[in-house]
Amino acid sequence: MTKYIFILGGVVSSLGKGIASASIGCLLKSRGYSVRMRKLDPYLNVDPGTMSPYQHGEVFVTHDGAETDLDLGHYERFADLNCHKTDSVSGGRIYYNVLQKERRGDYLGATVQMIPHVSNEIKTFISSDLHNEDFVLYEVGGTVGDIEATLFLEAIRQFRNEVGKENVLIVFLTLLPYIESAGEMKTKPTQHAVKTLLQVGIQPDILLCRTQKMISEDERRKIALFCNVNKESVISALSVDNIYKIPLTYHQQGLDTQVLKHFNMLESSPEPDLSKWEEIVKISSAYEKTVEIAVVGKYCGLQDAYKSLGEALTHAGIANHAKVKVTWMDASQLEPMSDEDVANTLKPFAGILVPGGFGDRGIEGKIRAVQYARENNVPYFGICLGMQMAVIEACRHLVGIKDAGSAEFEKPCTPVISKMRVWEKDGVKCIRPDNGDLGGTMRLGAYPCVIQEGSLAHRIYGQTDIEERHRHRYEMDISYAPQLEEKGVVLSGKSPDGLLPEIIEIPEHPFFIGVQFHPEFTSRPGRPNPIFKAFIEAAIKKDILL
Ligand code: GLN
């Protein structure tokens, strides 16, 4: 019988519930269990596709093409699994479904109410599309006490009664603030948060307490007494300097033991194999060298906007035994600079990466970064918009189309990047509707790409048939390919029908590659994405040559 684990948060937000959930998934997976991970986000947006990365961090794209919350990226990376479209839902989506059903007359004229209609819709999501997994984990976004979360908690309460308490575990992530002047760790906020949870009928089984210091036995006993859990289930979630230590520290604190004990599975459980994580922590705690990379992008004020990208660079660094020091650079700052100043700004870096993005801001700065990398033999890696910038730069400065640009931007131009109208997904032709709304008109999810033999991409991937995840509306206009190839820019990867350019490279350059997809979404600790690994390797080589 499948066991259900709900992870809720209390006291304050930003306690790292996503990584905590992902680490529980990781520990169960490391014992050989099948694990599914899901996110319930109470906010009213129907999906995160149109949410600003400034506010909400990156939009993570699943293999099957869902635009989801960045926490699904943590799940994929820590528990080494692929999430699905059906693994995330928002309050907005739940209400949207209920209202659509009401309009269709599905409720047969009944008065539509929060309970049972909305709560039932949430329960339907909780038990939908499951395939006999050993464990299904559900992280609930927000903090207990939020108005939006109320219905979700009610649904969880009902669900627990329906499937039996022995099949459900509630993990509650809280904070134990340390008051310097008193030299004491305070348990009161946690006690209050548990009370708030009890008011909606949910008793937590495990308290995962974020702390600066280990919780003493006395404090554990006190928390256990006031919060009605056993002492062993009060777990210290210590703040660590390296997120890859989290699964290991949770294991040392006995978190997986308590989870399995709750389900009466401890005796029969295999021991966890955490050797991969031990190796990762060993390397990342004592790097042999440092490599400096400039990421020239747009949302540089908030690192969560490039979460998977940062992680993929770190994975690639670990594979190369190098600390990747990333400078997140706002592309627009390069725009007013003289050529000399651009060169001076970019000189300290062994590699330049232009990431994905939307909209006009900083575009000319990104193009200047590409030009600098191309002309100065600095390893360049362009992702999605970063590939489009490389195409525009080459069209302008190598082919001589002075006003080359993208149809996405407002400035009049000769569009060498334009909107895809027709593409194929799983053998089915997709046609973009005229005036389609912003959500839902993108090429999303994994698509196959055929790589040209003997190319850099071929050497990187070691095969000609690959699959990577996409999220974009625009595409290089393939009719410019002959002119570009004549100037040494090769189209080394295309969609299987040969219509969509997926990878460009410059064979004469030490390392210059642009990809229309987002390889950062498939990178995992211990299994970096091949392009990231090769990019860091090239940057290290460049550093040695300097
Ligand atoms: N804005 C570009 C497009 O829609 C690139 C998107 C991206 O970088 N993810 O095609």
Image (cartoon, rainbow, N blue to C red):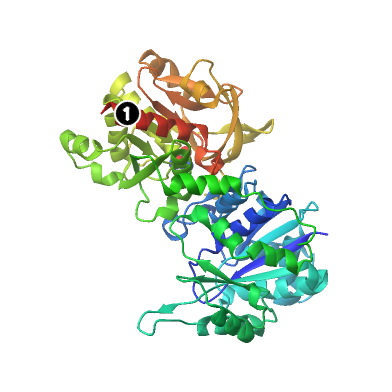
Q: How crowded is mark 1: few (under 14 residues within 10 Å), some or many (20 or more)?
A: some
In x, y percent, where is residue 172?
A: 61, 72
Whether the residue carrying mark 1 lies under 8 Å from ligand 1 is answered with no
Q: Quadrant of the C terminus?
A: top left
Describe residue 438's horizontal placement relative to residue 406 as left or right: right
Which residue does the image show at 23% across and 35% down from the upper left? Answer: 347
In x, y percent, where is residue 419?
A: 49, 35
Which residue does the image show at 61% across and 50% down from the upper left? Answer: 274
Residue 109 in view of the camera: no
Disc 1 marks which amino acid?
A: Lys
Residue 307 in view of the camera: yes
Look at the numbered disc 1 and give the secondary structure of its residue.
Answer: helix
Q: Name the residue under label 1.
A: 542
Which residue does the image show at 31% across and 46% down from the upper left? Answer: 329
In x, y percent, where is residue 211?
A: 48, 71
Describe residue 153's horizontal placement relative to residue 449 as left or right: right
- Judging depth in this view, the residue of 384 and 264 nearest the camera is 264
- Judging depth in this view, the residue of 21 and 63 nearest the camera is 21
